[in-house]
Amino acid sequence: MTAESEAYEIIHWNKMYILDLNTLQIDYDDDLGNKPELQRTTEQLWVDYLIVRMRPEAVIQKQIAEIFRLDNILDYKDTEVPLSENEFHKSLGCFHLYMSENEDVEITDMTLSIVVTAYPRELFKYLDETLCCSVDERYPGVFVVTGYMVPIQILHTEKLSEEENLWLWNLNRNLTKYLN
């Protein structure tokens, strides 16, 4: 078989799938709409910081590392506006995309930490009432979310221990006294 004949054997499943779904929808044309091949995001999704535990048996004695497993994604939200539901789901999207693109990474070996500067009161309400998750402040500024499929914590920089988390604690503060 030549490369030229192989090119003719490619089946474009996505187009067939869309046509099939369009025929399913014919009877409900006034009730249903569609957006085939909808672009998921207009911006690139980045993992802000990844902490990989090189030795699984290592004990990291830091408050923010209590939930850490092997691959730990930290997502920084650099705003004075509290973390919204949409931004929370964007962080989860980056988390799941990272996992899906790294076949050697198991979801049971991952955590997500979201670093915020403003207290996310409305998000905590959403997590409780809509996602049926509970939020527990384990240490000042370290909020652990339980009830979701993966360990999540929200790190509120305003409340973190200055002694243990100097650089996170100082985000959006005047750092000049520490830089001299």
Image (cartoon, rainbow, N blue to C red):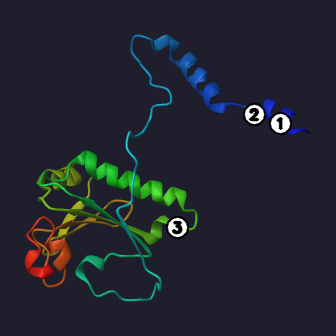
Would you say 8 lies left or right of 105 here? right
What residue occupies the far right of the structure in this picture? 1
Q: Earlier in the sequence, mark 1 or mark 3?
A: 1
Q: Give the image location of residue 55, x and y in percent.
A: 47, 86
The one nearer the camera, 123 or 102, is 102
Nearer the observer, disc 1 or disc 3? 1
* Badge 1 vs badge 2, beta-carbon distance below 8 Å: yes
Tell me the tag on residue 105. 3
Q: Which quarter of the picture shows residue 64?
A: bottom left
Q: Secondary structure at mark 1?
A: helix
Would you say 60 lies left or right of 154 here? right
Q: Which quarter of the picture shows residue 158?
A: bottom left
Q: At label 2, which amino acid type do we have? A: Ile
Q: Earlier in the sequence, mark 3 or mark 2?
A: 2
The one nearer the camera, 63 or 133, is 63
Would you say 27 lies left or right of 17 here? left
Tell me the tag on residue 6. 1
Q: Is residue 165 above or below residue 35?
A: below
Residue ID for mark 2: 10
What residue occupies the far front of the structure in this picture? 180
